[in-house]
Amino acid sequence: MKTRNKRKKSNQKNREIMIVTWAFTFLFVCLAGYITHYAITHRQELINNSYNGRQQMLIAQNRRGRIYAADGNLLAQTVEHEDGSEKREYPYQNLFSHVVGYATNGRMGVEAQANYYLINSNAPLSQKAALDVSGEKYPGDDVYTTLNVELQQVASNALGIYQGAVIVTEPATGKVLAMISKPDFNPEQIAEMWDELVQDEESSVLLNRATQGLYPPGSTFKIVTALEYIIENPDSYQNYSYNCTGAIKRGEDRIQCYHGSVHGTVGFEKSFAKSCNTSFANMGLLLDRGRFRRTLDRLLFNQELPVSFNYNISRVDMSEQTTDSDMMQVSIGQGTTSITPLQLNMITCAIANEGVLMEPYLIDYVQNSAGNQIKTFSPSAYGSIMDKEEAAVLKALMEDVVKEGTATRLKGLSYTAAGKTGSAEYGTIKGESHAWFTGFAPAEDPQVCVTIIIEGAGAGGDYAVPIAKRIFDAYFGV
Amino acid sequence: MVVYIGEFSKYIIALLIALYTLECFAVFCFDNEERRRGIYIGQNLLMFAFHFTCFLVICFETGDMTYLFFYAFQQIMLYAAVVLYRMLYPKANRLIVNNMCMLLSVSFVILTRLDMGKAVKQFVIVTGSLAVALIIPFFVHKFKFLKNLKWIYALVGIAALSIVMILGQTTYGSKLSYSIAGITFQPSEFVKIIFVFFVASALYQSYGFFEVFTTAVIAAAHVIVLVISKDLGSALIFFMVYVLMVFVATKNVLYLLAGAAGGSAAAYIAYTVFSHVQVRVQAWRDPWSVIDSAGYQITQSLFAISSGDWFGLGIYKGTPEAIPFVEADFIFSAIAEEFGIIFSVCLILICVSCFIMFMHTAAALKDKFYQLTAFGLGVTYIFQVFLTIGGGTKFIPLTGVTLPLISYGGSSVLTTLVMFAIIEGLYMIRQDESEQQRRALRKKKKIRERRQYSAGDEIEDEE
């Protein structure tokens, strides 16, 4: 009894001190946790900051690592001349200009994205010790990309002298197999051409059109409109019917079918396959704008994308206040809507992959000079951006486009393709349009997904689909 | 060869400090110094191993073996400190002495790496300070009149701070120091101790509203003088120490709340009135937008911390010189860069273990004056550690105070060594008290056995 009294008293006496002790201890636990978390999560981001002197130190200490294609073909390396000066060589010259990028006069592409790995060296200690003796630089770590040289070459040749972009991905993994942007440039000559490139605003050579080019999506956006119609009418979308007379009017606004076509009575599938503008403008007017907005959010419009390379945000204006006139324009991918080939490719991939979007990625793994993998990047699912059933319906619609619609040039091949064409009008002159195609193959088990835009070429079915065919042929080896 | 040494030493150093830190907390599992002896010896061995490894790396990385001479001097001095404390004050707490020496050796290593000239200067100052500090536990232990000097503490404190405010040299926007005969002093450092003694002596007997109010006026005078001198870090420390000491003295949560409210209001006013406070807050919220100006220091510090990884880049492998004033306000960032996150977290934990030992000492002291003093000094120490580490890592806005015992700076290290010495003196008083108590208890027990009845009141009342 007595001892308990005594203990109680002494506890009371020191309670305040104990409170302060625990409060400070807690504060320091938070501080230590914060420092650890900050340091570990910001390593790469901070080392790429131009104010960080550590970067210069690493560059002086290590020779910049090499960049390889997935099959081991060399895409970039640094060679040392006899006079001690270094030069970054790109064996394929212009072919990978945007996607691999450059590392002088700033950085771009994989050179920028993987800079941290390229300037660090995880060479074995024995090698470092030997190099210390001979006074040479340590070899930086090598970066293996997901890129495929053959597909890149085929896509680049197919695009020819046109301006535009091609992006080829694996829907099941998100691996980027090829990425072209034209006009291109020779990264080895970037320093000499720099002033010219920067001043040339018209063709914006340095812009990676595949990820940063913002284009009107045109009819390819009908994928999104159709998706929204299915979401709003899950049981009755097949009953949709519209009589196309070649044009639709709402007050002052008039929407025409491409090249003045008249499609007659069209159902849901046929509207999509024939890419009937008037039918889709009509469909757009039936949609709930608030729900449409939510669908667009789910498809990652107007927001950041889960990718670690540079891109621009694709924009669609959609709210309860959207007017009928704008609604008709949005539904057929015209008006203020703008999209990057990357974004369209991601949506297409999700359709091919049962609605699940895999995060697109370019860097497969990083390897040190002894051939040990330092860091590997595995496929990562961003999540489901549409339901499985909706994806299946869209896939069937895209198969019909090949069977009986605007992409029949892909019909009757050893593989079955699926996709959607687009002829996006731009500027004020009627009839000028960008040719789009986005699609995948084989339809029954999609392995490869391509998205193509050719600036100012004309109809997607005439210009973009043949390029898709050449890429699919190359992929399937036919 | 050098590559191998540099690489393996990183892991060895991390392991040594991790074990040392573990022992810092293992100490609290045993309740008397006798049983902790094994731990203390282990700590000393780890400390010397750490110190030696670091200097070995320094020698190999620079290719200059003469650093070993400097190392030898440091080692002798630290060894002397450990041995002399044990001989002169067998009743002193050895965890405090060990941690003090460990932190000093970390300081010598990082300062040698950053700036040899400053390291030598610091070594001389530390040697002198340790000699001075060695007699302090004796003073504290024996001289009972310290509790009666309330007004002298107040006068000396405010006077010293005011002199700096009026005559002091302005360094980087703040008036912090003045020079006598070529030696630069930073009085706000010493006044921290005097201030704790003032508050303790003012509140140990009675702590009604009147006493709290009069001490509040004096405390406010200290803080205001510091704010005018633009020494915001010290102002914050004085404020915090005062509020927490009142809370412990009065056991009244209301004072704590009042302090928090008053502090928030004062902080808000300072923010609206002083542009340099706004600059600091801006540099804390988004240093990247002002990376060229106000955010430069903190962003360089963040670069350093984030490039270290778990085991650090290795001594001489980083670029800590890029941080302005790295050896004073940002030494922690330099350590994080070259010694790594594990080491930095261990360093924080060592500081915390010192603090916990201070608080244990305070809690166990029966005499209220000594208890308040120990508590006040402990809070002064740990809050300064918090301000400097938190400020340098963007956890809180930067206030520009030093990391006690590790940063370069004579006034700072002398003050901290004196502070540690005072707490040793207080620890000895506590040992005396518990011995007396034990003796008294034994006596009581005998009496009780003789009398056969209990006397609970008496036990409660005993001193």
Image (tube, coloured by chain):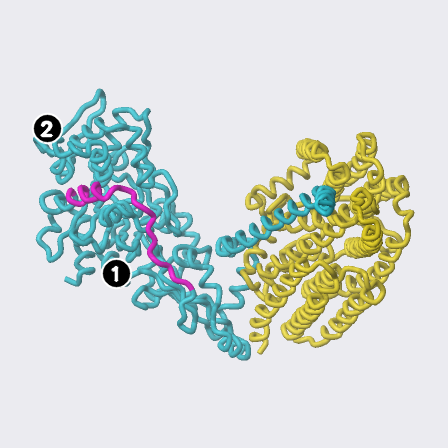
The residue tagged 1 is A153
Among the 4 quarters of the image, the one containing residue B3: bottom right
Q: Colour of chain A?
A: cyan
- In this rendering, does residue B208 appear at all? yes
Question: What residue is shown at x 16% (from left), y 52% (from top)?
Answer: A444
Q: Colour of chain B?
A: yellow
Among the 4 quarters of the image, the one containing residue A415: bottom left
Q: Where's the N terminus of chain B, which quadrant?
A: bottom right
Numbered tag placed on residue B132 in the rendering: none
Question: What residue is shown at x 22% (from left), y 20% (from top)?
Answer: A251
Q: Which residues are magenta?
A: A375-397
Q: Is residue B327 above or below residue B152?
A: below
The residue tagged 2 is A243
Residue A371 point in image, percent of width and height: 40, 72
Which amino acid, mark 1? Gln
Q: Secondary structure at mark 2?
A: strand
